[in-house]
Amino acid sequence: MAGAEELSVDGVSVELAGARLVHEVSLAAAAGQVVGLIGPNGSGKSTLLRCVYRVLRPAGGTVRLAGDDLHALTARRAATRVAALTQEHTAEFDFTVAEVVAMGRLPHRRGPGGPSAEDRERCTAALRKVRAEHLAGRGFLNLSGGEKQRVLFARALVQEPRLLVLDEPTNHLDIAHQLEVLALAREAGPTVLTALHDLNLAAGHCDRLYVLAAGRIAAAGPPAEVLRPALLAEVFGVRAAPVRHPETGALQLLFDRLP
């Protein structure tokens, strides 16, 4: 895995169809940090992430990785530094799982030809890490939602990014694989920017959280400072009771409806 790099999002605004969905958002992730975006549906999390991994261009502001403007890089150069696991799993052709994962090596290839022996070894190792090695010969379209998510995560890992962008990476996964994917993201070594709905997963796996509400940053800081009952009531409309995990001491939240 290549070294992690610092991410800096400076005053980014995003517009779609004439509507501004993200308003002058600034955030930072130090090299190797796991930074979480949380917020209710429609708060702008996925839109902001799409801007970071270059599907959308900012209407204002910049996204920088180790000081380089990501939107000024060539597509190939950007793909050697940024990988994304998105919510959309569209595929028109039924590639095998092995072929899908091998696509993650494309930015690193030089010249014509298929994957090298080293590429194939890296792909096999990535599938083994996500416990999907047995799926290598299966058609991707025939997989369950959770299996697809693990395969696409393996593809992102073999891309060897310096920044890994994850948009709801635990969707479709059972609890064991949810914990595994987030642990692997940290162990792999890149800087990680992830959107999460599960606030307990965010509390347990992120170094720093940014709360988005209506396209703006409502709060930022370590999970224990951000996930306070008053903020959660205001932003998420829930009553939250903070507790500590009996073994790890990590912050956890118990939820109920507001009266």
Image: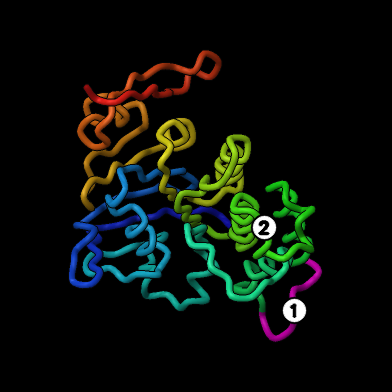
User: Visible in this render: residue 138?
Assistant: yes
Whether 111 is among the magenta residues is: yes
Query: What residue is shown with label 1?
Result: 114
- The crowding category of the residue bearing disc 1, from other C-alpha atoms within 10 Å (few below 14, some 14 to 19, many at least 20), is few
Q: Relative to the observer, which residue lies in front, 172 or 222?
A: 172
Q: Image height check: is 252 above or below 192?
A: above
Residue 42 drawn at (x, y percent) = 28, 52
Query: What residue is shown with label 2?
Result: 143
Residue 146 drawn at (x, y percent) = 61, 49
Residue 69 relative to residue 217: left or right: right
Question: The residue under label 2 is which amino acid type?
Answer: Leu
Badge 2 element: loop
Badge 1 element: loop
Residue 106 relative to residue 21: left or right: right
Q: Of discs 1 and 2, which sits in the foreground? A: 2
Q: Main secondary structure of the magenta part?
A: loop
Task: Say which quadrant the C terminus sits in.
Answer: top left
Residue 134 drawn at (x, y percent) = 79, 53
Q: Relative to the observer, which residue lies in front, 111 or 213?
A: 213
Query: Which colour scheme appears in the figure?
Result: rainbow
Question: The residue under label 1 is which amino acid type?
Answer: Gly
Q: Relative to the observer, which residue lies in front, 78 or 230?
A: 230
Residue 58 relative to residue 92: left or right: left
For image coordinates 35% across by 64% down, the residue present is 51
For image coordinates 69% across by 71% down, the residue present is 95
Give the magenta range.
Answer: 110-118
For image coordinates 20% across by 33% down, the residue present is 234
